[in-house]
Each structure stands twice: as C-alpha cells, then as structure tokens.
Amino acid sequence: MLRTHTCGELRETNVGETVTISGWVDSYRDHGGLVFIDLRDRYGITQIVFNPDQGQEMHDQARTLRSEDVIQVKAVVESRPEDMFNPKMVTGKIDLLASELTIFSKSKTPPFEPGTSDLPGEELRLRSRFIDLRRKSLQDILALRHRVTQKTREYFNNLDFLEIETPMLGRSTPEGARDYLVPSRIHEGSFYALPQSPQIYKQILMVSGFDRYYQIARCFRDEDLRADRQPEFTQIDIEMAFVDREDILTTVDGLVSCMVKEARNTEISLPLARYTYNDVMERYGSDRPDLRFDMELIDIKEIAEVCDFGVVKNVVGSGGRVRGINAKGAAEKYSRKNIDELTAFVGDYGAKGLAFFRVKDGKLDSPIAKFFSEEHQKAIIEKLEGEPGDLLFFVADKENVTSAALAALRARLGKELELYDPKELNCIWILDFPLLAWNEDENRWVAEHHPFCAIVEEDVPLLETDPGKVRAQSYDLVVNGNEAASGSVRIHDSKIQQKIFDLLGINEEEAESRFGFLLEALRFGAPPHAGIALGLDRWIMVFCELENIRDVIAFPKTQKASDLLSGAPAPVDAQQLKDLFIKLDIPK
RNA sequence: GGGGCCGUAGCUCAAUUGGUUAGAGUACCGGACUGUCGAUCCGGUGGUUGCGGGUUCGAGUCCCGUCGGCCUCGCCA
C-alpha cells in the first residue's frame, strides 16, 4: 500500500505515530520557512507541515507543490498547540510533520479547484468532469447512491428475489419512446434497439418461473431532455408472479422505507398513502401532486356561469371548467408585475388568462371584481375558504388546461411561498390510471402506461362502449411531486393481450411481428404477474434535495445529449459505416 | 419542432445612452516571509469579448445568422 492511513482518519490519538498518506494537494501556503499543504482524498483533508529542518532538498520540492498534484508523504503525527486548532476540520487538532515527500504526478493548472466556493458554469464542470468529481458534494452523492443500491439489493435478496440481467441489444417495438438504434454488421439493414426498459424480458422471466425478479437496469430513451431526464437512466426494475396489486404495493412500501432509512436515517410510516388518479386530478390537477402542502383546486362553475364576465361565462357554456386555488396570505407578496409573470407562466400550459382576487374586508379586490356581485364574491370566498390577505387565482378553460395550468401554478406557489419543509419526504401512491388516452395527432387510442397493463375487472365492458373510461390496474409512486415509480398488473392471457393491441390499432400481423415473442410466451402457461420500476436517479435527487439529474450521475449528458467529457456522439470512419451498410444523408 | 435566459482573462464577474488603451478578485509566474489554514505583502504575465456577417465615424454593447450551455412547452408507452 502506498499509504498507511487516509486523509480523513488521523486524530489526536494518533499523535507520535509515523504514518504514510497519499492524496491530492488541496491547497498550499508557503511561508518561505514553513510550507503547509492540505492533502485531500475521498475521506477528508489533513494538513501537512514541511519544515526546512527536515531536509532542504525535500523542502525545496515541497515549495513547488501546486493544486491537484498527487503526492505521498511520510510523516509524524503531531498535536497542534491549542491556539492553532482548526475547528473547521475534523483533523484540525493535529498535523503531520513531513519527513519524506514523493511527487507521484504534477497537475497542470486545473480549470477550477474542487474546493472552490464559487462553482464554475456547468459546461466547464462537465467538460472537466475528472476535476468536478473530486468535489466533496459529488463524491458524497455518488457514495449515497451506492449505499442505496446496495440496500436495495439486500432488501430483495432477503425476500428471495433473483437479480437477472436482460439484454441491452434488443428489438425495437412500436409505441412508447423513440429508440436508440444499433446497426447490425452481420444482418445488413437490421438494427438492435437499446431497451427503453426491460419490460418484455421481465415478463418472459415470469412465464419461465422466476417468480421474483429485480434488476438495477439501465434504460435508454431518445427523447428531448429536461432537468430530471437523461437519455440513459437507471431503474430499479421489479416483477413478481402469483401476486396481485396489493403485493407489489406492499413490497415497494418496504423498499422505500428501507431506502429512506439508508439515505436519510429516518423512518417513514407505512403503508404509504394511496389516492386514485381521478381523485388527484380533480383535487390537484396533476397525476403527480406534491402533497407536502395542501392548496386544492376548487371548482366555481355555479358562480362562473352566472357572473357578468363574458369570457368566463362562455367557457362554462362550451363545456370548459373554472377552477381556482387559494394562495394563503399571499395578497401582499405578489405585485401586479409578479402576477403578470404568473399569467405568462400559466400561458405555457395553454391557459389564455389568469384571474386573480385579493381577499379584503370580506370582498374581492381585483380589476375584474366588478363582474361579480357582492353575493357571488362572498360565495367565492366561502368556497375557497378565503381570509383577509389571501390571493385567489382562477383559470377558465378546457378541463385539461385548467388542470395543467393550476397544477403548475400550485407547484410554483408552494415553492415560492415556502409552504413546505424542503427536507420533508412525501410519498404517495396514485392508482387506477386510465388505460388509454386519445391521441389527437394520430387519431387513435394510445396506451397511457404501456400496452401490457391489465384492466380493472369491472371496467372490461367499457372497452366496447367507452374506452377512455377504462381504468388500468396501474400504479405510480410520487415523491414530492416527482414520478418516482410506475407499474401495473400485467395481462397474462394472450387473447386479452391481442384485444388490447386491436384497440391500439396494432393489427394481429403487426403484433405478431413486433411482440410475437411475448405473445407466444403467454400462450405457454403464463402466471398472473405484476411489476413496477423505480427511477433510481430521481430518488437520489430527492434524497439529496437536488433539482438536477446530472448531479446524481457520474458522467451525465447535456440537454442535447452530448457527453462533453468524451465528445460523444461523434462521427465515425467511413469504413465503420461501410461495415454497417450505412450511407449518410444529412439535410443541409 | 416552439418559447425564454446566457456566452468578456484559466475561473467568477464588471465595463454610463454605442465612445479613447476592455477592468477587478482569484488562479498562474517571480520575489519576501518559520504557525498558516480564503495566509499576508511587493511585482508581473494573461483578451480574436463563442464564431460569422451587417448597421455605424466608432460595436463587448444594436441587428441577422450560427455554435454551445441552461430552463421550459410539445415529446418522454
């Protein structure tokens, strides 16, 4: 070993010991006589003192040390005089008097120092990720991520689950996200697809009798990115046979409790709260509401349809909705200019306007208050439980617009008004999603979750009459407003599966060619099964109170899916393309 | 595909309504200094203002295009 101790472990109890430590120069202070080096590794920082009395040659070398040089030092642990303690460092009561110095490697002047207080732009951090990853905060995050994944494995192993790997090179299937494709050299003109998830393979594992499966699986989706979305991400993937929905929820409750205990060292109370999709859409306008705070959406249709405000009245007349929220005590916190910003904000979600009222002396104060009689103003205040100083917002529009706009506004207000403790964890189940959603562009039904979801038994007749009302036996787990897991009971009958494909406009021939291997497997004795996948990256984000998924991934990609460190993606040699029978045709 | 913000020294930032030689802190280089820990003090190097075009007597500043980063709508079964 090139060290006897790490840079984080020496204390006063080690005084007098001769030790060898290695690490990176975090900072240096050259007093001409004495030279101080703060030496850093993953475990901490320890101060080394170079005294010319210990040898002039070593001392001359020590004076050349600069940030990020990698060195080894043999030294004696000394206690510091009390007035020289550094209370900011856990190793601050000792330092090391160096007797030997080895410089393993000099560093070029780093683009930034890992210990810097003003972090450089993210572009530079990603380009110089080897430096960025030396920062304590990133090292701590990756260590936490490691502990959570190890706990996850321990949890499932104890329950007799098997961790089984599934292929990365698979087959492109219709529906869902855009695939990342990999051309085949051996089969000219054919392509593998990287998995969007191991969905079909894990179902086949159920058919094969591996009744408890899990995998910490990489998934790939070639869609536009967001702060919480990467082109490749990690799922904790789970599938169980001979279970119903309840078994999955209970199993995942246990897993979440276990992860929270590991990440936060806190207990959460089980079972996790459950809501139906219809319930949360009505009360919060979102299928992933942040329930760390209240602020429910309230419908004021009866008042709106009789008010004198033509625009609002017409919305009700044409089947739209008028819904609002109450920002408690916010009347004075939002100026007219602030509210204009909020109006533009809800505009992103399709809302053509944002009505607002300040509650004042039992009446409403607003440019549009005149359209509402005193009686109606009182009714509105009562409905939204308004008190003096409250600020009420309303959106009148098609139902889905009121939902989207008010849900986004609610999330924004909750944050800006600090309505919750950012450290709190709120985990809730959302059950019974619609099976299908109507796609306007393609003029057909598409699967809301995926085409393998089982149907809520009593809704089966609706398949013929009102497909949009059919509920799936599906469930999402939402943490602080993030979709953190999603799953369903699966169809284990090939005939029913075919029926769903029919509804989705995937005919028998196409289904057979694209999903045939799953359908065929289901024909050979498929057990009832169900599963779910947790978005590991998002859980780590929540545990670390981060809003950026790139901060929980060692080597993330930019919004344009580039890896600034390696330069991927990049052109390849003409010969490589030739081997793959690929000719480029790039529009100018 | 749409909308928004940003790009000035290695880094973090500044630069009056368009106005002379683009500044500061830090880093880096040289010097002084035996108890610092954001060391201190003295001196110095460092710029194609992302790139290309345009308007103007004059552009870091205004306009167009382009590249890159971030946020977001659509998209993400």
Image (tube, helix red, strand yellow):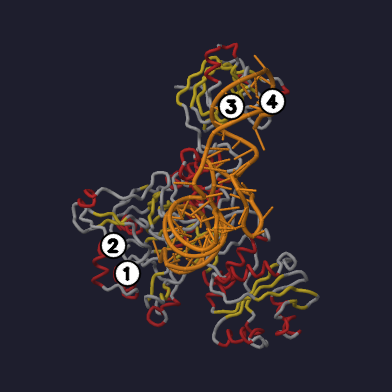
Q: Which residue is mark 3?
A: A28
Q: Which residue is mark 2?
A: A518
Q: Nearer the viewer, residue A526 or A128?
A: A128
Residue A136: image quadrant is: top right
Mark 3 and mark 1 lie on one chain; the one further toward the N terminus is 3
Could you tell me if residue A272 is visible in this image? Answer: no
**CB contact under 8 Å: marks 3 and 2:** no
**How many neighbours does mark 1 have within 10 angstroms: few (below 14), some (14-19), or many (20 or more)?**
many
Q: Which mark is residue A85?
A: 4
Q: Amino acid at mark 1?
A: Gln
- Label 1 chain ID: A
**CB contact under 8 Å: marks 2 and 1:** yes
Identify the secondary structure beneath mark 3.
strand
Mark 4 and mark 2 lie on one chain; the one further toward the N terminus is 4
Residue at 27% x, 65% y is A514
How far apart are the two marked residues, 2 and 1, measured between alpha carbons?
10 Å
Identify the secondary structure beneath mark 1.
helix
Q: Nearer the viewer, mark 3 or mark 2?
A: 3
**A158 versus A426 height, above or below:** above
Q: Amino acid at mark 2?
A: Leu
Side (left or right) of A339 relative to A26? right
Q: Nearer the viewer, mark 4 or mark 2?
A: 4
Q: Nearer the viewer, mark 4 or mark 1?
A: 4
**A110 versus A562 height, above or below:** above
Mark 3 and mark 4 lie on one chain; the one further toward the N terminus is 3
Side (left or right) of A243 relative to A574? right
Q: Which mark is residue A497?
A: 1
Residue A584: image quadrant is: bottom left
Identify the secondary structure beneath mark 4.
loop
How far apart are the two marked residues, 4 and 1, measured between alpha carbons?
71 Å
Q: Nearer the viewer, mark 3 or mark 4?
A: 3
